[in-house]
Image (cartoon, helix red, strand yellow):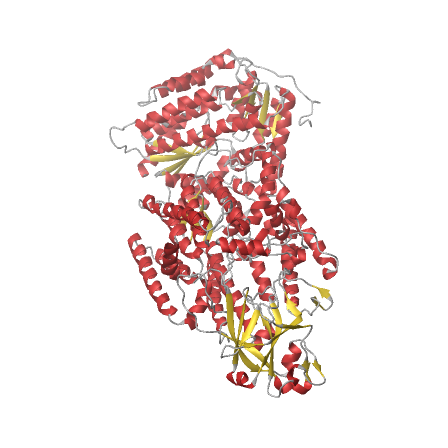
Amino acid sequence: MNTLYTFLAHYLEPLTSCFYLLGLLFLFLFLSRRVSPATWIYVSLTLFTVIFWLLYRIIEEYPAVSRWTERLNSPLVVIMVVLVLPAIFFKHSRWYKYFLILPALLLILSVLEIFHQYQEVPQGFAWFLMRPGYLIAGVISFLVLAHSFMGLATFRRATRITMVLVLIYGGFAFRQNYVDYQAMVERRVDTGKDLMVFSETTPVMKYEQRLSYIPSAPCRFSADGGYVQGCVMELLQRIMQLNFSKVARGDTVEMTLLAIALAALLAMVVLLFIGARWWCGWICPLSSLGDLFDFLRKKLGLPHLKPSHPLKLTYLVSGLSFAGFSLLLAKAYAHIDKQGAFLGCKIPMHPFCKICPGQQVCPVASKGIGAYPPLPGMEWLFGFFKIAALLLLGLFLFGFITSRRLWCRFCPMGMIGGIFNRGGLLALKKDVQKCNGCGVCSDVCPMNIHRVQEEKKHNNVSSFNCIYCLKCVDKCPQDQCLSLQFSGKIIVQSTFKING
Amino acid sequence: MLWGMAREKEVLLIFQPISKDDIIDMGMEIQKGDDPFLAEANNTFLVIGTINYPSFSASGFHRLMAYDVSGQPLSLLIDRSSVYSEFEDGTINSMRIAILIDYPTFQSGSVRLTWGESLNAPNKVVDQIKIYENSLDRYRTFAWESKPQQENTDSYAASLEIIVDDQADIYYLWYLLPLGILFILLIVRKKLLK
Amino acid sequence: MDKQFDETYKLSPRFSDNPENLKKQRFIEETQIRIQAELPIRPTNIAYFETLMNNQDQKKKSKPRIGYFCNMVPREIIGALEAEPVRLDCGNNAASQVGEEVLSGEICPLTRATFGSFLNSNSLANTCDLLVLPAACDAKRKMGEILNDFKPTFMYNLPPEQNFHSYRDFSFRETLRLVTFLETHLAVKLSRKILNREIKKEQRRSMLVRTLQEERIKKPAALTGADFFLIIQSSLFRPAQLDEWLLETEKVIDQIRSFQPERTSLHPRLILTGAPMVWPNFKLLNLVQESGADIVADTLCTGGQSCFDPVVLDELGKKALLHALTNRYVFASICPCFISQTTRMNRIIDLFKTAGAEGVINYSLRLCQLFDMENFRIVNTLKNLKIPYLNIRSDYSLEDTEQLRVRIEAFLETL
């Protein structure tokens, strides 16, 4: 397994670059606009891959350049190209069943990897140890295989549950290998720590000089660290907390931190450009945890609250205000004195994280209600953190208990994705002539978006708040009325079907 | 690309001059008098600086050592008050140190700093490293210099790692180029949608 | 429960049993049966549907019977309250003459005929226990007031605009009022589970009618328009056993699928749109058929469109189910009684394209202002799209049959 891994890591390394993914997608966009025949497209994409691979190997000879590009590498990229894009684009071609051999093989390899890691472990050990490349490959392979025989709603549920397991529980359940696991156990301390000094959260995918983020809210403040470094707010705070006067003076350390953060930002913008707010709808583990309340409510047959326009606006404005203010606090953090205070106010590192419900919900999810961190005292910015933490937790719970995804209208992490909704590669499209005006799309939408139903002229009905959960596409009874399109190519369409 | 655990890490420290402004920026006051550490010999220098970057972590004051170019260990002073632990779990992420060097080492221009769990150095810990105005000309500070990467393709125990980029002047600004392109593309596509 | 109608000036129900007129009504129905019996190709089990439509024993009932009008009343609610829903719109010319004597000749024939059927003490309409009328047009609104003297009536108010955002709650409240009305009079509580079950049954009807329409589009010769209407209307306008009907309809679909036409049909393909065409008022269908054209699809609320939209369920709480019903019955409707009919035009144009039709015939009922004025938009829009179009304005009487035939044949020549 080790030799296989090093072989794959070495030969696939060029394809782990974000630039590869972007180049591939832009080439595809360009070609499909020209309506080229299918073979032409495959040939060009293969040619591009080969050329890129060679270019990358050439650049590797110049470490002065390559060490900058290496920060944008991630196993997620190559797995998306190899598994996800074919599953989307080749789904209806006759080669699809042959393609399925690949995810099946990768799934087997992932299982073998677990066994292999276990050979180095003393008896009685219970968790999964997997190198991230194998974990991501295995999880995505499982989803690609499973979705072939699942309805859209079931597939979405399966994906969300898997993502909660990986991103929240990943911190202690999916370490890279036994050594990594031991290091985690050594770092582990009493989690009864205050919210403001939240203890050990080293994510699994922590590489030297490279931070891995995915959009939406994969909070790493769960037990033992979560899987990735965190959400976009974590990154923005990190950037804000750099001392830019030091950077201007050429402080090497500060500049390196900035470089790492910018690389992480670029990698995340690539993911956002590709998937916009889909990460919110299908991947975000924080919302999946919140939706447990929604699930309970539905099972009990209780109705949900359709939020009025003022309520929606309140959530939006509060989200922007709290996020903006926290980023200012983060900026202030760069200039704190020895007591950790700025102009007499005590400010923690990552101020938004301290008030975000993620840092309260994720530990509880991973370790039980007893793991709820004690609230900060009033000395932290005159009690702002204590009050805000409780307030935001209240908004979170209220939103999910009564009104499906109302919280997502607050979430600043989601709003960054929302910018890419109209203009990114993913789009929700409507064939207006086929709409019968029934309003089902408005009723099922967890974000209470009316645009899909009301649009009577234009094709593109994506909107800032849409999380691409695809409930509207699933429920629309008119054939081919609504569709999810990825740079013009239809991924899934509405069809007439009856429940049950 | 290896994602394993390193046992020891090291980096090269290049000496740089230190000015009064630098001292004030480091938050230190200039005391009156002579520096007791430098009083022992005439041609010794004290290289003072703060270790402050992501992958540094030491579980204690004795987990780091400094060597000169010939491999001789140098005495390290640690400033207890400057210790910063990101997660307050006993791991030191940043602290101020001072290295006492002699003239030949000073002329060589660099020392090697190593840290890791296997080290146990007799470092001296003081409450606070102080700067004295009479010895100002014998203070220096340090900057990082990376060594050429050695390729170990089939072993987890890498003993050398690239820590910090040298000449990390403004190359990071190149990241803004693809970022900018993506945003411009986004805006253009948005305008086309209207 | 709030009372909609005040009893101060209540009149006692009056009947005018006229045996001559009843004979005329029977004669009209039998004529239509005969015309359809002479159609070249009919499904083998068409007798089931004909019996359903014409059997006088239908008047016996085992459950409370609720009469309703139009296509906007949720049948599932009625079914879930252990009652049987029957649509009471009447298409018999003789009955409209009876109604005309009592009310006026200047109101729409459908209203006159329906009222005429109530004047007959022995009619199916009079076996109903309760009535529900959607306030779709002025005629129905006033008729509701009048019919309240005959049977307890509920006026189901519709929003003036199909503006989901503004009127969703209004329509939902109306649905709740309907439920309260029915629960009180039937002394049964609406159960969420039974409602769910009824919805699933009606969804099946929706699926079958859609499939039937799709198969007919491919092979219009296998099932004529008149038979298609007969099949659908026998389940809506008569108290039918839905399970039986579903089975029989499936057999019809199978027959269509296995039908092999002897030669490719050269008949012009037409889309029918317009006002309700209720049994036995199939005059236009007969004419088109006799003129050698095929009506491959239609947007009539008494034809293919009646079961076109399914109820779409998301959450299963009682409120959510009622919302889903309101969405389908009120907001998906393409009746011109709502202003701003983009969805109506969309449906006509979309159906024209997907069915590969060559022309559109609009049937507007004389004295119906809604459909008559709708014609204005349809004529101009279709002219812009270069779609051949014919507007037929007629009522129930057979006097203008020949004139219409000439017009239809002339229209077919132009295709």
* Residue drawn 65% across the image and 53% down it: A190
Tell me if C213 is positioned left or right of B27 in this view: left
Tell me if A384 is positioned left or right of A130 in this view: right
C58 or A470: nearer the viewer = A470
C7 or C389: nearer the viewer = C7
User: For residue A350, which quarter of the picture?
Assistant: bottom right
Is residue A118 visible in the rendered structure shown here?
yes
- In the rendered view, tell whether residue B193 sits above or below residue C78: below
B127 or C91: nearer the viewer = B127
**What residue occupies the far left of the structure in this picture?**
C263
- Looking at the rendered image, the quarter that the N terminus of chain C falls into is top right
Image x and y of residue A344, in percent: 74, 67
B88 or B192: nearer the viewer = B88
Q: How many marks?
A: 0
* Residue drawn 62% across the image and 35% down it: A302
Is residue C106 visible in the rendered structure shown here?
no
Image x and y of residue A30, in percent: 37, 59
- Looking at the rendered image, the quarter that the C terminus of chain C falls into is top left
Image x and y of residue A372, in percent: 66, 49
Image x and y of residue A71, in percent: 47, 64
